[in-house]
Structures are given as structure tokens and as C-alpha cells.
Image (spheres, coloured by chain):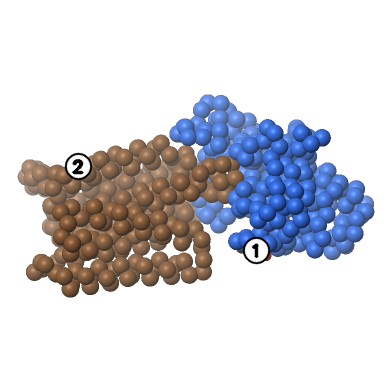
């Protein structure tokens, strides 16, 4: 035990490790907040589709060799978020298929572009780390960490300010519309925030795993709690705890950070299901 | 008379994506009125209600809101949506969301708004269950919660889309009585219903949407052609 702590102490002497923990906690917090809304609005597929789009965008950015890939990835992902939300609302027969098509093509084109215009010698390593996050500990610049902190503070602030409206719009869109709430504006905002969260989270857990950070906390909380507020609070705590645990374990065991966090989420989810069953909250 | 009207429809044409479902709809709703909309499945009753609520826009014609009634002063009880079924929300959270138009851009609900929500929850006899989970309530209780929410949004006009669908006869009667009581307290009601018995028992006016449109008082409706035809079809329940 004391070995573990002294090992951690040494690791936390490195700025990289501290940055990773800060970013991990913030991304986990932000993604869990809107997860509840996404799951309840049956929008979880949007998160999944978007992460693939972000992968495609990132490969374009790396081919263009822009200094900060965020400037390419962020706008593309936001635009796609808005488009996906639109098509989801119309609920046309092939809306789902359209989203699946979009996300799969983004993956395929992304890989293709990277392959054709590859500048690095370690292509499969690059692809792997964009899909599943960094192999070992994250290497983030101070600038990236600050960007993440600012964005996270913004997202949490917006969420707190709009909490009541987000609940109303999620619970019953037509009632909200009927009493004059600008439902479209709120939906748009939700879509934009999701896009931002996905781009932020890509560094941490990679684009394939980010939707796990959005969905697991919400589903776990819904197994145990019955009011919107307690579900939201619990999923935030759940997500942060799992992220911290995942990061610590990945440091100590030398496992890839993204998949360790998601594995922690998965195990905690199963625990929540069992707890829910024991407490008789299976409804 | 006219300045007492809450809503006036003149030659309204309704439908989706500019394909006309029903046209030449003419009726008005006075303050404290009780209007029942009847008609077969797919006749366009819900479409009309959504048009009145401006959830969809009318294709042509006039839809005038009377003085002292703004669009945000209308209470609405929609047909239940799928999303609500397993939604984690307490009764209190649901009712309080009825105050969203009062709150406007303000992020939090005031004391007055919370008091209003509590008052309406009491009016519906659901205040004991405020902390309970909405999804674990019975269908009748859920409708009462949604009615309390609608009441938070309005003092003047309630639009109810088949509020008793799926309820057993006892719960149905109880809900009708509560709605009737609200009407007696001065809230105008526009309600979609398949129940002609209720239409004749409580309502003042009837709008029948069918091949021909009828709008008039209950007495006029009973005597009219479409009234008799509809009553026969529904099992002759209009006869005393
Ligand atoms: N979103 C939509 N887009 C296009 N057409 C629609 C839409 N919703 C309903 N319709 C069509 O409009 C017609 C009228 O529907 P509406 O829901 O108004 O009927 P209703 O009178 O309320 O029936 P019910 O008694 O079954 O509730 C139906 O033929 C329906 O198929
Ligand atoms: Mg209907």
C-alpha cells in the first residue's frame, strides 16, 4: 500500500501527470452532465456519431498540418452536431441509418486520408491513439490544459444557469414549446455543447470511447435515483470518481488511460445495477 | 361579446407541410368557455390543437388571440410521449416546470412560483406525493400531475388532448370532475375527447371535426345531423 502511494507521489511530481488528472476530471464532469439529457432524449447515438466525425476531422487537421488541430476539429464537429440533431428531430424512417452512414464514412475517410497523406512513420500508432486515447500517460501542453479548463468552466456554468430549462425541454418538448419556451435554441445549445465535450474528451479517452463517458454515468444514476436532480448529481460524482480511479490505475499499472477509465465506468455501472436490484429499484 | 373572446378562428386551414387536412374551420372560445372537440381518429383534432398552440403554423386563415391572452398564458396537456415513460423526475420537478414561462430567462424559480406550483398540486390532490417519482405513479395520477403543471402556466385557458385516454372509469370520472371544477373557477377549457357523454354533460360548446364541420352549443349539436350520426356511432350515448 505505502509502495503505491510513494509511487504515485513520484508520478505526481511530473507536470504531465497532474495535467492529465485535471483534464480527466473536467472532461468526466462535463460529459456526465449532459449525458442524462442525451440518454433521455434518445440522443445517445448522436454522441457516438459525433465522435467518429471528430476522428475524421482530426485526420484532416493532421494532413493540413495546422498548428492547433482544435481549430479544424471543433467547427466541423459543431456543424455536424447541429445537422445530426436536425435529422434526429425529424425522426424520418431512415434518420438512424443516415447517422450511421455519416459516422462510418467519417471513420473510413479519416483513416483513408491519414493513410494516403501519412507524414509520420508510425501510422497505426497514430490512428490507435486517436481512436482509443494515448497509449500511456497523456502528453498535454499547458495551452491545451488551459483551453480545457476554460471550456469546462463555461460548460458547467451554462448547465447550472439553464438547468431548469434543460429539464423542461428534456421532459416535455411540446409543452415547453406551447408555453413559449424557445425549444430550438436550447436544443441547438445542447448540440453545440456536446460537440465541444467530445472534442475535449478525444485527447483523454480517444474518439471511440468518449461516448462511454457520456452514457455510462447517466445510465448508472438512472438505476439508482428517481429525480432529475439526484440523477444529474450522482452521474457527475460517478463520472469524476471513475475518471480519477481510471487515471490512477493506468499510472500504476501502465495501462492505456482511456480504456482504463471506460473499464472503470463499466464495472461501476454493473455495481450500480446490482445495487439497484438489491434496493429494489428495478423499475 | 367579441372583446371577451379568448380565441377566434376564421376560415382556418390546418395540415402538415402545406398539405391541407381540414379547411374552413370557424369557431371562437369565450372566457370561461368549455369546448369539446370530437371527431373520428385521424380527423385532425390534435392537429387543430397544435395549430392553436402554434406548435405548427396554420396554412391559411386567421387565428386571433383575444386581448389579455398571450401565447405564453396557455396551459397544455399533451398526449403522453414515449420519452416520459422511464424519465427520472419527481412530481415536484414536473409541476414546477409549468412555471417555465413565468421564469422566462431567469435561471431559478422564485418563492412565488414554487408557491404557485404547490397550490396547483394541492388543487389536484397530489401534494402528498410531491417527492414521489413521476414514472411510478398510476396513469390517472400522472394526468393529474400534468394538469397541475398546465395550471401553473395559465389562469385563463387549458388545452387538453384526450386527458382520459387509458384511464379506468373511476379515474376518468374523477379527472372530468376536476376539470369541470376548474372550469367553474373560471378557466376556459378546450378538450379533445371521444366521449360524447361528457360532451353533453359538462361542455358548453362542441366542435365536431368530420366530413362536415359543426360548431355550436351542446343543444344545437344534439339536434344536428352530425350530432345524431356521431352519437349513433359511439353507441347512442347522447340520448338521456
Ligand atoms: N407530424 C405529422 N406530419 C404529417 N402528417 C401528420 C403528422 N401528424 C399527424 N399527421 C396526419 O394528420 C392526420 C390527423 O392527425 P391528428 O393527430 O390530428 O388526428 P386526431 O384527430 O387527433 O386523431 P386521434 O383521435 O387518433 O388522436 C392523420 O391522418 C395523420 O396521419
Ligand atoms: Mg389526437
Mark 1 beta carbon near ligand 1 (under 8 Å): yes
Left or right of B211 in this view: A189: left
Q: Colour of chain B?
A: blue
Comparing B172 with B117, the one in front is B117
> Residues under labels 2 and 1: Cα distance?
53 Å
In the picture, measured across the screen, residue A232 lies left or right of residue B41, that is left
**Residue A205 rendering spot, x and y as whole percentages:** 23, 56
The residue lying furthest to the top in this view is: B111
Residue pictured at 28% horizontal, 68% vertical: A107
Q: Does residue B92 appear anywhere in the picture? A: no
Mark 2 lies on residue: A146
Depth order, front residue of A47/B213 = B213
Chain A in the picture: what colour?
A: brown
Residue A197 appears at what percent x and percent y?
A: 31, 50
Residue annotated with mark 1: B19
**Residue B115 in view, yes or no:** yes
The CB of the residue at mark 2 lies under 8 Å from ligand 1: no
- Does B154 appear above or below A213? above
At 43% from the left edge and 39% from the top edge, which residue is drawn?
A162
Which is nearer the eye, A88 or A61? A61
Amino acid at each position: 500500500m505505502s509502495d503505491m502511494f510513494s509511487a504515485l507521489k513520484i508520478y505526481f511530481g511530473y507536470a504531465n501527470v497532474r495535467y492529465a488528472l485535471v483534464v480527466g476530471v473536467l472532461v468526466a464532469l462535463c460529459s456526465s452532465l449532459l449525458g442524462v439529457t442525451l440518454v433521455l432524449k434518445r440522443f445517445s447515438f448522436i454522441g457516438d456519431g459525433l465522435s467518429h466525425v471528430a476522428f475524421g476531422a482530426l485526420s484532416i487537421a493532421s494532413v493540413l498540418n495546422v498548428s492547433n488541430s482544435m481549430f479544424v476539429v471543433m467547427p466541423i464537429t459543431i456543424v455536424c452536431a447541429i445537422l445530426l440533431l436536425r435529422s434526429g428531430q425529424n425522426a424520418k424512417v431512415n434518420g438512424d441509418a443516415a447517422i450511421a452512414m455519416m459516422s462510418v464514412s467519417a471513420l473510413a475517410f479519416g483513416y483513408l486520408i491519414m493513410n494516403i497523406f501519412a507524414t509520420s512513420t508510425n501510422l497505426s500508432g497514430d490512428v490507435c491513439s486517436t481512436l482509443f486515447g494515448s497509449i500511456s500517460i497523456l502528453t498535454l501542453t499547458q495551452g491545451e490544459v488551459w483551453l480545457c479548463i476554460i471550456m469546462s468552466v463555461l460548460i458547467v456554468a451554462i448547465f447550472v444557469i439553464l438547468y431548469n430549462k434543460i429539464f423542461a425541454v428534456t421532459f416535455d418538448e411540446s409543452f415547453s414549446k406551447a408555453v413559449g419556451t424557445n425549444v430550438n435554441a436550447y436544443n441547438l445549445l445542447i448540440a453545440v455543447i456536446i460537440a465541444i465535450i467530445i472534442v475535449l474528451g478525444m485527447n483523454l479517452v480517444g474518439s471511440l470511447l468518449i461516448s462511454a463517458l457520456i452514457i455510462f454515468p447517466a445510465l448508472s444514476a438512472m438505476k439508482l435515483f428517481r429525480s432529475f436532480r439526484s440523477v444529474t448529481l450522482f452521474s457527475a460524482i460517478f463520472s469524476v470518481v471513475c475518471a480519477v480511479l481510471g487515471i490512477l490505475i493506468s499510472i500504476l499499472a501502465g495501462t492505456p488511460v482511456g480504456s482504463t477509465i471506460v473499464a472503470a465506468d463499466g464495472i461501476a455501472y454493473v455495481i450500480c445495477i446490482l445495487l439497484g436490484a438489491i434496493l429494489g429499484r428495478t423499475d | 361579446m367579441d372583446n371577451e373572446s379568448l380565441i377566434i378562428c376564421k376560415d382556418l386551414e390546418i395540415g402538415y407541410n402545406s398539405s391541407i387536412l381540414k379547411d374552413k374551420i370557424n369557431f371562437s372560445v369565450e372566457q370561461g368557455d368549455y369546448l369539446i372537440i370530437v371527431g373520428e381518429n385521424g380527423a385532425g383534432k390534435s392537429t387543430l390543437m397544435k395549430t392553436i398552440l402554434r406548435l405548427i403554423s396554420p396554412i391559411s386563415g386567421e387565428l386571433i388571440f383575444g386581448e389579455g391572452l398571450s401565447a405564453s398564458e396557455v396551459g397544455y396537456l399533451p398526449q403522453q410521449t414515449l420519452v416520459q415513460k422511464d424519465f427520472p423526475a419527481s412530481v415536484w420537478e414536473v409541476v414546477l416546470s409549468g412555471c417555465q414561462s413565468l421564469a422566462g430567462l431567469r435561471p431559478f424559480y422564485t418563492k412565488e412560483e414554487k408557491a404557485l406550483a404547490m397550490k396547483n398540486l394541492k388543487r389536484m390532490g397530489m401534494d402528498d406525493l410531491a417527492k414521489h417519482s413521476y414514472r411510478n405513479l398510476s396513469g390517472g395520477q400522472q394526468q393529474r400531475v400534468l394538469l397541475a403543471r398546465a395550471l401553473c402556466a395559465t389562469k385563463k385557458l387549458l388545452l387538453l388532448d384526450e386527458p382520459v385516454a387509458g384511464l379506468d372509469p373511476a379515474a376518468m370520472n374523477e379527472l372530468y370532475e376536476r376539470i369541470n371544477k376548474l372550469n367553474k373557477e373560471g378557466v376556459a377549457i378546450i378538450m379533445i375527447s371521444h366521449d360524447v357523454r361528457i360532451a353533453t354533460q359538462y361542455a358548453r360548446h362542441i366542435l365536431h371535426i368530420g366530413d362536415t364541420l359543426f360548431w355550436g352549443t351542446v343543444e344545437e349539436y344534439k339536434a344536428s345531423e352530425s350530432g345524431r350520426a356521431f352519437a349513433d356511432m359511439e353507441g347512442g350515448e347522447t340520448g338521456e
